[in-house]
Image (cartoon, grey):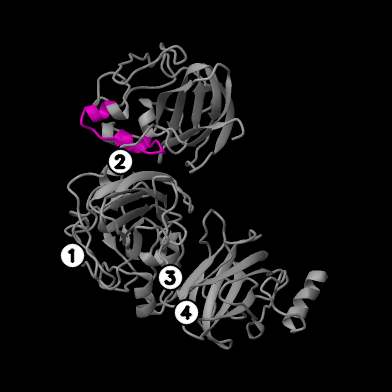
């Protein structure tokens, strides 16, 4: 009763408006609550009327109750979001309009675009000076609940392309949807590494918004099978948020999460062309970053994607992950690269096989701090809409020599000695089999295998079923990043140990229905037992032994997360300790992350 009383007093003008009233709710456009360009307000849609009676001016296919707000433009970039502040209690949606309440024009909408798996919403647009914008906070379908609406407004002429450490959607020049016959895994890292725009070469060319690449050799030199944007162009065309806004009066979703699926939905719902597909497709996007110093700058590329992702910095690939997974705006992998003095082009490829389709790409410095618009020595130029920038190439690969094998808290690929074996238990192997001996007659608790060792495993006695690396060697053979480097075969490395990619690189005939056994060594330099927490994430099932004790045993058919999916207690003996990790795969992605935390986590 008190909350409702406060709301009524504010709406009726009996109390001054401070931008912090509790649970504001106006479900009629004509009575919209005015907020300023940098405001935070808690609200609710419980008990409100449906946002529209006939859905004529609703930006999306929603008919849920809503709350109305109004905001005055200042000529600068404006953002409204339900992602900040207290968590919303439901699946929100946002729609933004210009015009009068009886004749509204939709300029943007969004369902889900947050820095997590949260189902909250964000809309950004370039506002007009003194133009009134109506903001409708509603929900997906008929969802209702409580929300926090946050508005932010930059000064006119100020452009923030990486305010939070991720390069935002407006900063990318995009080519999508390219039809993708290779599914969520992109066909594996070998196919992903091919030229998807042949005969064009993105290492040498700098496409601009509006450029049409009608001569891409689909089903030939390009692994792509075509292009379909619902007839909005004669063929493949590069676009930006700005270009689409000016050409079609459609405000595509923005924010740190570049949501290609939502953009396809928005283009379809705008009725400016035919349906735009968002299944079995892929996107290619470019952006420009300037290193204003006189020396090469080591950076780390933070990436998250749904599904597979490749990131090139100039003419060198830094990230190459074949995976069927969801994403959030947190790093799913971090990989080293280098910014040359001057202009650098970042090119991101994202493949989709059904479901979500999005990416979040950011840069981090040597201390793993996000590089933003305010970072000294860096300028984020965005999509180069004026066409003034030219990328460059380097004959030498980036200097990515890492100090140590656990620089960021995860045991990197370089830390592990690995053995791949065939298995018939699928993704979620029964626990009793997982706990068995997969290398009989050898005993992992007693052996200390080294890279290059051949093991004559008795597959009739072992839980594993065979060895598929005949191209690699006749017998099951242990290998590491260093041993393969000696053979002239570079492996994908990172905090994420990507067995799926490595299998292709080493020459295994298949990376389905397979498993890995990996060992690494950790020294406790004290004279006493050291209690630690073993943090694991995996695709799919995982077992971790510390010395001869099984710490983690998880049977699951799942994708891996960028953080701990489970944490288990273990003790490190004084001296050398062996950690053995088993990861099973039944189809799709195959990887792991393992870190050790102190006893407090």
Q: In this view, does 259 lie above or below 106?
A: above
Q: Name the residue under label 3.
A: 252
499 magenta-colored: yes
Of the two numbered discs 1 and 2 on the same chain, state the one appearing first in sequence: 1
Badge 2 crowding class, 10 Å Cα cut-off, few under 14, some 14 to 19, many 20 or more, is some
**Position of the C terminus by quadrant:** top right
Q: Name the residue under label 4.
A: 127
**Position of the N terminus by quadrant:** bottom right
Of the two numbered discs 1 and 3 on the same chain, state the one appearing first in sequence: 1
Q: Please give left or right for residue 215 compared with residue 105 in the image.
A: left
- SS assignment at label 2: loop
Q: Do tag 4 and tag 1 residues touch (Cβ < 8 Å)? A: no
Q: Mark 4 and mark 2: span between their CA atoms?
A: 42 Å
Please state which of the two labelled residues, at mark 4 or mark 2, is closer to the viewer.
2
Please state which of the two labelled residues, at mark 1 or mark 2, is closer to the viewer.
2
The residue under the point 21% across, 67% down is: 214
Residue stretch rendered in magenta on the structure: 483-504
Q: Is residue 250 above or below residue 214?
A: below
Q: Position of residue 120 (x, y in %)?
A: 57, 62
Of the two numbered discs 4 and 1 on the same chain, state the one appearing first in sequence: 4
Q: Do tag 3 and tag 4 residues touch (Cβ < 8 Å)? A: no
187 magenta-colored: no
Of the two numbered discs 3 and 4 on the same chain, state the one appearing first in sequence: 4
Residue furthest to the right in view is: 1
Please state which of the two labelled residues, at mark 4 or mark 1, is closer to the viewer.
4
- SS assignment at label 3: loop
Q: Do tag 4 and tag 2 residues touch (Cβ < 8 Å)? A: no
Q: Mark 4 and mark 1: span between their CA atoms?
A: 37 Å
The residue under the point 63% across, 58% down is: 87
Badge 3 crowding class, 10 Å Cα cut-off, few under 14, some 14 to 19, many 20 or more, is many
Q: Position of residue 422 (x, y in %)?
A: 37, 26
Q: Name the residue under label 1.
A: 215
């Amino acid at each position: 009763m008190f909350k409702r009383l406060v709301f009524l007093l504010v709406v009726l003008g009996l109390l001054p408006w401070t931008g912090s009233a509790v649970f504001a709710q106006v479900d009629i456009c004509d009575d919209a609550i005015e907020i300023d360009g940098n405001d935070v307000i808690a609200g609710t849609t419980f008990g409100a009327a449906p946002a529209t009676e006939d859905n004529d001016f609703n930006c999306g296919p929603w008919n849920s109750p809503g709350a109305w707000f109004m905001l005055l433009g200042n000529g600068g970039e404006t953002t409204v979001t339900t992602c900040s502040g207290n968590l919303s209690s439901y699946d929100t949606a946002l729609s933004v309009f210009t015009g009068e309440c009886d004749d509204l024009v939709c300029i943007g909408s969004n369902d889900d675009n947050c820095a997590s798996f949260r189902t909250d919403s964000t809309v950004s647009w370039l506002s007009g000076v003194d133009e009134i914008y109506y903001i409708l906070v509603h929900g997906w379908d008929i969802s209702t609940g409580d929300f926090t609406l946050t508005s932010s407004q930059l000064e006119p002429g100020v452009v923030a392309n990486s305010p939070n450490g991720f390069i935002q959607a407006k900063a990318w020049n995009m080519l999508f949807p390219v039809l993708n016959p290779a599914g969520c895994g992109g066909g594996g890292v070998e196919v992903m590494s091919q030229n998807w725009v042949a005969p064009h070469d993105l290492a040498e060319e700098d496409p601009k918004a509006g450029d049409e690449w009608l001569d891409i050799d689909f089903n030939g030199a390009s692994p792509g099978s075509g292009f379909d944007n619902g007839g909005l162009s004669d063929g493949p065309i590069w676009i930006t948020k700005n270009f689409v806004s000016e050409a079609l009066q459609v405000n595509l979703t923005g924010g740190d999460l570049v949501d290609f699926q939502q953009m396809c939905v928005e283009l379809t719902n705008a009725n400016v062309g035919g349906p735009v597909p968002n299944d079995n497709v892929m996107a290619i996007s470019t952006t420009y970053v300037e290193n204003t110093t006189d020396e090469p700058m080591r950076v780390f590329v933070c990436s998250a994607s749904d599904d597979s992702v490749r990131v090139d910095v100039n003419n060198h690939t830094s990230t190459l992950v074949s995976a069927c997974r969801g994403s959030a705006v947190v790093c799913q992998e971090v990989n080293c690269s280098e910014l040359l003095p001057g202009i650098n082009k970042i090119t991101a490829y994202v493949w989709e096989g059904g479901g979500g389709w999005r990416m979040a790409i950011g840069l981090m410095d040597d201390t793993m701090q996000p590089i933003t618009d305010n970072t000294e020595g860096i300028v984020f130029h965005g999509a180069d809409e004026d066409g003034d920038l030219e990328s460059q190439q380097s004959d030498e690969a980036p200097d990515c020599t890492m100090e140590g094998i656990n620089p960021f808290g995860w045991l990197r690929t370089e830390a592990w000695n690995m053995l791949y074996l065939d298995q018939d238990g699928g993704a979620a192997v029964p626990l009793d089999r997982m706990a068995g001996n997969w290398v009989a007659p050898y005993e992992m608790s007693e052996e200390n295998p080294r890279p290059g060792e051949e093991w004559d495993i008795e597959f009739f006695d072992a839980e594993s079923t065979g060895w598929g690396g005949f191209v690699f060697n006749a017998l099951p053979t242990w290998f590491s990043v260093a041993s393969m480097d000696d053979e002239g075969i570079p492996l994908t490395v990172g905090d994420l140990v990507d067995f799926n990619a490595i299998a292709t690189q080493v020459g295994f005939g298949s990376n389905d229905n397979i498993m890995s056994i990996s060992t690494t060594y950790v020294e406790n330099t004290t004279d006493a037992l050291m209690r630690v927490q073993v943090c694991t994430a995996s695709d799919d099932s995982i077992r971790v032994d510390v010395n001869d004790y099984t710490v983690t045993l998880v049977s699951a058919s799942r994708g891996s997360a960028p953080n701990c999916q489970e944490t288990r207690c273990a003790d490190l003996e004084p001296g050398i300790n062996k950690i053995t990790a088993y990861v099973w795969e039944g189809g799709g992605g195959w990887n792991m992350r393992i870190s050790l935390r102190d006893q407090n986590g």
